[in-house]
Structure formats: structure tokens, C-alpha cells
Amino acid sequence: MKQLLDFLPLLVFFIVYKFFDIYAATGALIAASVLQLIATFAIYRKIEKMLWFTFTLVLLFGSMTLIFHNDAFIKWKVTIIYGVFAAIFVVTQLMGRPVLKSLLGQELRVADKYWARVSWYWVAFFVSCGLGNIYVAFELPLEVWVNFKVFGLTALTLINLFGTVFYLYKHLPEEQQKELK
């Protein structure tokens, strides 16, 4: 259910873009993000910091897109989010408390060197996605960027997420691997 709520604004953005234009899609993205917040709170009685952060960026950059009638703002939002994610991974890794270990360390007990490798991998991934977004957003047609944002970046993220879980699973102690089977 939570994953569906996470993808709902993106799906609404894509569908509205296909029938109208980037400005209608941006307005729909803002509205869907508000509904996402309301639904998340109604179901879970809390809203995570990351959801507040992404909502704030959607509201800020989406509003600027609509006010100035310039799609560059909504295009930059994607790169800024990836940049912030990369920064979070760098800072938490340098502090000795990798964010992924904080999230998954109870379920996956692997050596710190593997958490570090995964953290630096995700930093490179987020930076690459941010740079890729800049290129696609500003060098290719809008239609290509929308498809890249909705399908390309989403697919890449899911592939990398599964790859990360597989990598960490390979480095689990044998007794924990047996527990998870």
C-alpha cells in the first residue's frame, strides 16, 4: 500500500501530461502530492521526513513552474532530490552511520565494509541520475524527459535497489541467510 502511495503522484503526473501538457501535469503532481500526504497520515498516523522533503520540493518547484510558466523548474527538482540523497549518503557514511545501515541494519547484519561499499555505490548512482536528468531535461525533447523521469529513473532505482539487497544478502552470515530463506 505504501509503495502505491509513493508512486501515485508520479503516475498522475504522467497520465495528465499525456492528455494535456507539462503545466497541467505539474498542477496535478502538486495536487496528488497533497493527497498523498493526507492519505499517508490517515493510514499511518505519521508522515516521514523524506515525504515532507519531497512534497516541499514538489510544491516549491511545481509552483515556480506554474507561476513563471517555465518547465525548467520542475525539471531541476529531480536533480536536486538526487543531489540531496547523494549528500545524505556521503554525510552519514563519513559520520560512520550509513543511512542504509540505519534503515536495514536490524534485518541485514553485514560487516561495515559492505555498508560502506553500498553507500558509496548509491552516492555514485544518485550523482549519475542527477547528471543524467540534467542532460535529458535540457538537451532532449520534453516528451523524452517525461518518459525518462517516470520510467527510466524509476526502473533504474528499482534495479539498483534489488541489486543492493542481493549484494548485501550474499554477505550475510550463513545462519542469517538460512533464517531469511
Image (spheres, rainbow, N blue to C red):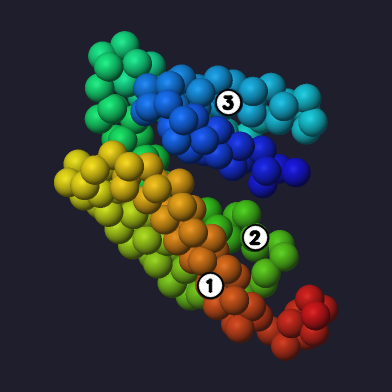
The quarter in which the C terminus is drawn is: bottom right
Q: Picture coordinates of residue 67 (x, y %)?
A: 31, 11
Is there a contact, CB below 8 Å, between mark 1 and mark 2? no
* Crowd tier of the residue under label 1, counting other residues whose Cα lies within 10 Å: few below 14, some 14–19, many 20 or above: few
- Image mark for residue 32: 3
In this view, the mark in front (1 or 3): 3
Asked which secondary structure carries label 1, the reply is helix
Residue under label 1, please give it. Answer: 163
Residue in view at x 24 percent, y 43 percent: 141
Secondary structure type for disc 2? helix
Q: Which residue is mark 2?
A: 104
Q: Would you place residue 81 above or below residue 61 in this image?
A: below
Q: Residue at x 35, y 16 (%)?
A: 66
Residue at 32% x, 42% y: name it. Answer: 143
In the rendered structure, which amino acid carries the disc numbered 1?
A: Gly
- Among all residues in the image, which is located at the extreme left? 139
Residue 93: x and y, percent?
43, 58
- The kind of residue tagged 3 is Ala
Decide which of tag 2 and tag 3 comes sooner along the chain. Answer: 3
> First in sequence: mark 1 or mark 3?
3
